[in-house]
Image (cartoon, rainbow, N blue to C red):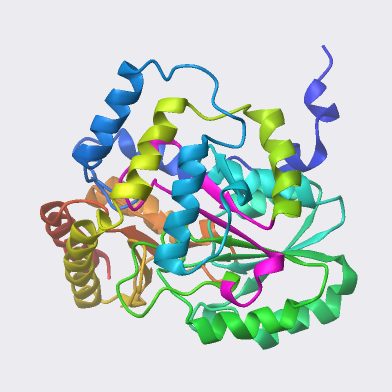
Amino acid sequence: MIDLTKYMKKGLVEQKPGNILAFAMYASKIPGIIKFNIGEPDFATPEHIKEATKASIDQDHSHYAPSNGTPGLRAAAAQFLAEKYHQKYDADEILVTNGVTEAIYDMMMAVLNPGDVVVVPTPAFPLYMGDAASMGAEVVQVNTEESNFKLTPADLQSVLDKYSDRVRMLVLNYPNNPTGVMYTQAELDALADVVRDKPIFVLADEIYSELIYDGEPASIEKSLHDQVVVMNGVSKAWAMTGYRIGIVAAPKPILTQLAKVHQAITTSEPTPMQDAAEEAFKYGQDDALPMKEEFLKRRDVLLKGMQEAGFDCLDPQGAFYIFAKIPEGLEQDDEKLAYQLADEAGVAVTAGSYFGQGGQGYLRLSYAISLEEIERGLERIKAFVNKNK
């Protein structure tokens, strides 16, 4: 029998299955495990958004929406970006996608050719690296551990010096998953200066933009509008991960090309879900505030507890993750330690190495679980450390 997988797309076949998903499936089978590995809010979607979804169904909005998104949602998204972040886009510069996951794929498919270089500051969510590799691009990871997990202009310039005209895309995610780090506007301006007027696209993943605890929101779009593709959505800030609505904002010539990929793979997003997202952007601009207050309480409890357990932790400025360095005396292989914690302590955390260079020797813990669960999980972690250190 012929093995047809040998004749499938090389970048895809060589790509390893997702370690994060594999671990999550493993951990979910352990009775009573506390899941610090969850990457979605545990809150309910706001009632007015649920009512808008029901109304959409009752009004028989059950047919194809325009491929780029309903006019109402695109206008609401453009208004939201302008009012909240001073990002100036017209409604026809907005594309509605199946979450930011599809948006990332659309952009990489539209931009990258085999041999192009994609620069990814790491640690970073592995989807960027996997998508780029499947396009035949070369992923250059920039280890940011020594610069407080932020890409510096000097490090970016050194990559450009080495790879020259092959560099086609820079990926930035802020607040960052897994570190919770947020850039200042001055820091993003400085990065913009390095790539300005070069044939380099910037993928700005701002899906956690409503969950910033310290400092002001910032965006590289403000200093590099013509080269930036902004990605956002309703998943994190409105607890709507299952609605699968992301938005892409880009100058019209770029968006037109991205839309061709979107049309080929999804046609359009579900109309009732788009109506729900329109409601969120138009009438729910403050919906994230109570959630953010609760996340802040959880962050402080988890941060203090992990430090008491001996972990050196980065103080996250946004999102809902803590990146904790494994203390001496414990297993230093972060993947082995993650499985050990699951098996022996009944606690699920995510290995830092799953997020690329700079993640080795760290664990990512999500505080998108209840305060009670966090406190119980900390007790288990502290007991595990005392037993094994």
Q: Residue 134, located in which quarter of the rendered image? A: top right
Given residues 91 and 193, the one toward you in this image is 91
- Residue 205 shows in the view: yes
Question: Residue at (80%, 77%) from the top-left corner?
Answer: 160
- Classify residue 272 as left or right of residue 358: left
Pinpoint residue 38: horizontal percent, then vertical percent. 34, 48
Magenta residue check for 49: no
Q: Is residue 220 above or below residue 69?
A: below
Nearer to me, 335 or 299: 299
Q: Check the image and report above or below for 158 versus 347.
A: below
Image location of residue 262, percent across then percent down: 66, 36
Q: Residue furthest top?
A: 1
- At x 31% / y 56%, what residue is drawn? 285
Q: Confirm whether residue 39 shows in the render.
A: no
Residue 376 lies, with reference to residue 85, above or below; the image says: above
Q: Residue at x 28, y 24 (%)?
A: 54
What residue is rendered at 39% in x and 63% in y?
363
Magenta segment: 222-251
**Which part of the image, by quadrant, shows the N terminus?**
top right
Residue 5 x/y as whole percent? 78, 26
Of 386 and 176, nearer the camera is: 176
Is residue 249 within the magenta segment? yes
Q: Nearer the viewer, residue 206 or 310?
A: 206
